[in-house]
Image (cartoon, rainbow, N blue to C red):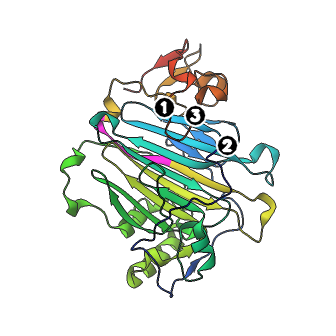
Amino acid sequence: GSWCTATPPTNLPTTSGAAPTTSTVAPVPTAAPTVAPTPGGGFNGDPIILGLQNQIFKFEGRDGAWYSNISNKFLQWNMQFRKFDSCPADENMFVSGISLSIDFENDKKSDILIITTPEATPECREDPDKVCLGEGTIHISLGGGQSFISQPGDYHFGNMNRIVAHNTYAACSRKWHDYDVSKNDWRHLKTLQEKKPLQLLKDNKSQMIDATECNRWIDDRTNQNDLFQQKGKWSTLYIETESVSFHVEYRRSDFFHRKCDFQSLDAWMTKVSDAMETSADTWKGILGETKYKIYDGQGQQITTDRNLLLHGKDDADYEVDGPFSAEFAAATMSSEKIVVSSQ
């Protein structure tokens, strides 16, 4: 629970993404999005787990706790839950933190931490010309929580790792999409193949809340070259590493409509390496277990019953001690269900 704090993190460095004084504000809707996503491997909203084999189920969790989402030799993906008391009783738990430990098997482990805070950092709150992600309420650490970045930008770190972060016009907020399997050896990709931030935004426009309206906003950003100067309450993050890539959408309630005052991180994988996809190493964790289809006695795939889909009967079976912990009870549990591998 120590990571669920009302105090903004310290040591937030300023970056080259600092904003000029002529930034614009991207408007946002006044309520949480209601568009039902297509299952594709991740979590969103309250939090609903969207499985890797078209499963969909709710995972309750505990306020302030961290849970293992995917655990294998390539990736440890944990998520933190936070309860928002102003929201309806059965819809008041949201994902407020994400941690990613990547590529430990190659001795090049990167620890990425994304956290949200109820209040903005002082520099974002006090300087009206400062452009901050989510108005200074979402923070990214590329070094396991030692220091944080709160400004939009295109950040490269470690070995072939990258995070692109910018504030988002509501119409451009992504609904969902499945992940692709990369057959390439990512270590040998040329820098020229790296997509520009605006191209990342343009990809999969059909999955956006309003593709037509978003396209006009993208054209403006292209013509004015000011994507990283956009102010706004919502933010988008693209995370690219050798083994796996992610898309993260940060959404908040509107300040003037506090019926349900929430902060939410929706995250899903957009690409995994062929090595990770085909590895004999079992995927564990809440989402990891959904890589394998489970059938009932009549041969029908089980897609919605959380108690039948997951090895651990209690949500606490997936709880870890902190953002970068990889130990949880369900990791050693076996299933007696009829399981068919995704391979």
Specify few, some or many for label 1: CA neighbours under 10 Å numbering under 14, 14-19, or 20 or more.
many
Question: In which quadrant is the C terminus drawn?
Answer: top left
- Marking on residue 64: 2
- Image position of 32 with respect to 132: above or below: above
Q: Amino acid at mark 2?
A: Gly
For the record, the magenta segment spans 268-275
Q: Amino acid at mark 1?
A: Ala
Q: Secondary structure at mark 2?
A: loop
Q: Name the residue that disc number 1 marks.
A: 326
- Distance between mark 1 and mark 2 Cα atoms: 17 Å
Q: Counting residues from the N terminus, which is met first, the one under dot 1 or under dot 2?
A: 2
Horizontal side of 253 relative to 168 (left or right) equals right
Measured in 3D between alpha carbons, the distance from the residue under mark 3 to the one under mark 2, in whole angstroms, is 11 Å
Q: Is residue 305 visible?
A: no
Cβ atoms at labels 1 and 2 below 8 Å apart: no
| Chief SS of the magenta region | strand
Instruction: Give me the residue at 47% from left, 57% from top.
Output: 147
Circle 3 sits on which residue? 321
Earlier-in-chain disc, 3 versus 2: 2
